[in-house]
Amino acid sequence: MTQTSLKISADFDSGNIEVIDASNPSLTTLAIRPDTHSPHFQWFHFKVENLQVGSAHAFSLINAGKSSYNSAWSGYNVVASYDHENWFRVPTTYDGAALDFSLAPSEPQVYFAYFEPYSRARHDWLIDQAINKAGLALVATGKSSEGRDIQMLRKGDGAVGKRNVWIIAQQHPGEHMAEWFMEGLIERLQDQADPVMQQLLATANLYLVPHMNPDGSFHGHLRTNAKGKDLNRAWQNSTEELSPEVFFVQQQMEKYGVDLFLDIHGDEEIPYIFAAACEGNPGYTPLQQQLEEHFRRRLSEITSDFQSRYGYPRSRPGQGNLNLAANSVGERYKCLSLTLEMPFKDNDDAPDALTGWSGKRSKQLAKDVLTTIAEMVPVLR
């Protein structure tokens, strides 16, 4: 019996793949497309149809060795799903050039991705949940380069004198764990009887931007928006033309003020959850240092999914990159300002062989972060 040729597609939200050779159903060679107007590439997401159930199918991403973070493939396992909802890890190898993985599927079609994707449809659902279930207000809506909505939400009455807590996510469009994190925040805020959230909202307004880079995510980018701009390198020179996403949020921050800022990301290489801070800022204050240490210590006490042993090298005094969101906001508002990183791989402190780090685990981390923030609001200033 002649086996039907595999059908491979990526013409959908956050899809990214180029088919090099699919003539051999047992070994398909593929390549990752770079971001539009940028050489960055690492994110992939594609669908395979006409699979032979129970037979091994192998796939090779032959340009992985030239990707933006090629050393990050070591120790990484691809995620897969039959229904685009339940994702699991597939054993994966990397030889310095190609990323190889195989699957003997239980269904005739499967999705593969760099990480569990967060779709625009789910984003729209999340905004609806935030407004209609969690009671957040849609305070302002910006526009991306291609005209997609960037919603800014607020939980709280906006009263003057309260602390203003800001959390933004997915400046880098391929870091889909960031919006899973935001879903966790909004899920917890739906519980009107949660005493910790009551404590938080009694003294703080919570401002959320669940997705900063919708164009990049839709197009299957790793790093940049539709104009080829890395938004997390645009906080000193944002413009309405090239980085309207950052420009919008900065305007809103000026309007409402900032007392705490978290920028939610994913890291390709480091298999831990960690925070990067503002120690290199020229205007770094002793209070900022105390608050950073307090945040790290308390969150690590609340959850084993956070730690401070591994992370980025600390910046030397005065050498911080002020183009980064957390550094820029920390310098401007002299507040606690952190980049929170989650892995594309797994958390080596608490590994899960089935899922690795996942959307579900990102959501739980968010709920633990909210506990930490609630406890810290009284000491932010």
Image (cartoon, rainbow, N blue to C red):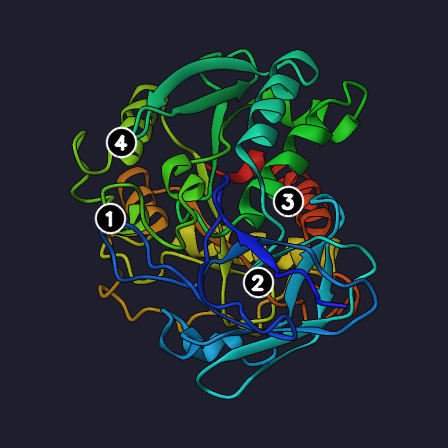
* Residue contact between numbered discs 2 and 4, judged by CB atoms under 8 Å: no
Q: Secondary structure at mark 1?
A: loop
Contact, mark 4 vs mark 1 (Cβ under 8 Å): no
Secondary structure state at the residue bearing disc 4: loop
> In the rendering, which numbered label is found on residue 145?
4
Question: Disc 2 vs disc 4: which is toward the camera?
Answer: 4
Kind of residue at disc 2? Phe
CA distance for labels 1 and 2: 22 Å
Please tell me whether mark 3 or mark 4 is closer to you in this view.
4
Q: Is residue 127 above or below residue 298?
A: above
Circle 3 or circle 2, nearest the eye: 2
Mark 4, Cα crowd under 10 Å, few <14 / some 14-19 / many 20+, is many
Q: Which mark is residue 255?
A: none
Point 73% across, 22% down: residue: 190
Q: Please tell me which residue is depicted at 49% across the width and 52% down the height of the picture.
A: 175
**Disc 3 and disc 4: Cα gap in Å?**
31 Å
Q: Is residue 70 above or below residue 338?
A: below
Q: Earlier in the sequence, mark 4 or mark 1?
A: 4
Sequence order check, earlier mark of 3 and 2: 2
Which of disc 4 and disc 3 is earlier in sequence?
4
Q: In whole angstroms, how far apart are the C-alphas of marks 3 and 1?
A: 31 Å
The answer to the question of whether label 3 and label 2 lie on touching residues, with beta carbons closer than 8 A, is no
Q: Secondary structure at mark 2?
A: loop
Q: Is residue 201 above or below residue 211?
A: above
Q: Is residue 112 left or right of residue 109?
A: left
Q: What residue is pinned by disc 3? A: 369
In three-dimensional space, the C-alpha distance between marks 2 and 4, rounded to whole angstroms, equals 27 Å
192 relative to 376 in the view: left or right: right
Badge 1 density bin: few <14, some 14–19, many ≥20, Cα 10 Å: some
Looking at the rendered structure, the kind of residue marked 3 is Val
Query: What label does residue 344 carry, if any?
Result: 2
Q: Which residue is mark 1?
A: 228
